[in-house]
Amino acid sequence: MNAAAGAIIPWWISVPLAGLVMAVLIAHLVALQGPEVPASRRRIRTASGLLMFVLAPLMAYAVSIAGPQSPRAMTMAWLAVLLLLVMVVGLAWLDVANNLRLARLARRELQEEAARALAEDLRGAGSRRA
């Protein structure tokens, strides 16, 4: 691999960095498979992680290998990078909305549980009085 003329970053920096990012993404995706992660959160974050897994080497290619000497490859690489970034940001917003939904459900369940416990306490106090 020769250094591309006009490359933003030398390939010997970007390619190992992309490999490191991909290794971290694999560890993150494996950690998501635990039973304590809600299924909806797991699906969104898995999709996002897989997109980033594709994005990392593509970004390394765009900043280091595709250069002005091949404008078509450079344009296609950067368009793909931008498209994947938009998709990752969209999934991040979807994750935010999902987390708000999950928090609302958890809060509702906690309130219902507290109301049931209070009702039981009141019934117990009423039967002791009688």
Image: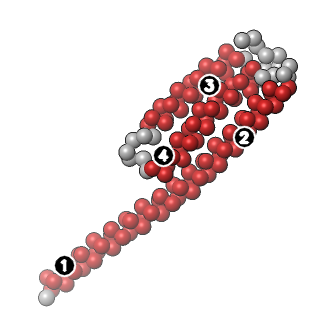
Q: Position of residue 85 (x, y in %)?
A: 68, 40
Q: CA distance from mark 1 to mark 3?
A: 63 Å
Say which quarter of the image contains residue 60: top right
Who's the residue at 59% across and 52% down the image? 94
SS type, badge 1: helix
Q: Residue at x 23, y 75 (%)?
A: 121
Q: Which numbered disc flags the more N-terminal residue, 2 or 4?
A: 4
Comes first in the chain, label 3 or label 2: 3
Q: Is 105 left or right of 49, judged from the image as shown?
A: left
- CB contact under 8 Å: marks 3 and 4: no
> Looking at the image, is mark 2 or mark 1 earlier in the sequence?
2
Disc sitting over residue 42 in the figure: 4
Q: CA distance from mark 2 to mark 4?
A: 22 Å
Numbered disc in front, either 3 or 4: 4
User: What residue is shown with label 3?
Assistant: 18
Disc 1: which residue: 124
Residue at 19% of width from left, 84% of height from top? 126
* Picture quarter with the N terminus: top right
Quadrant hosting residue 11: top right
Q: To which quarter of the image does residue 80 belong?
A: top right
Q: Is residue 67 above or below residue 3?
A: below
Instruction: Report, in whole angstroms, how far the alpha carbon at label 1 lies from the one at label 4.
Output: 42 Å
On the image, numbered disc 2 is attached to which residue?
A: 83
Looking at the rendered image, the disc whose residue lies closer to the viewer, 1 or 4, is 4
Q: Amino acid at mark 2?
A: Leu
Q: Are marks 1 and 4 in contact (CB under 8 Å)?
A: no
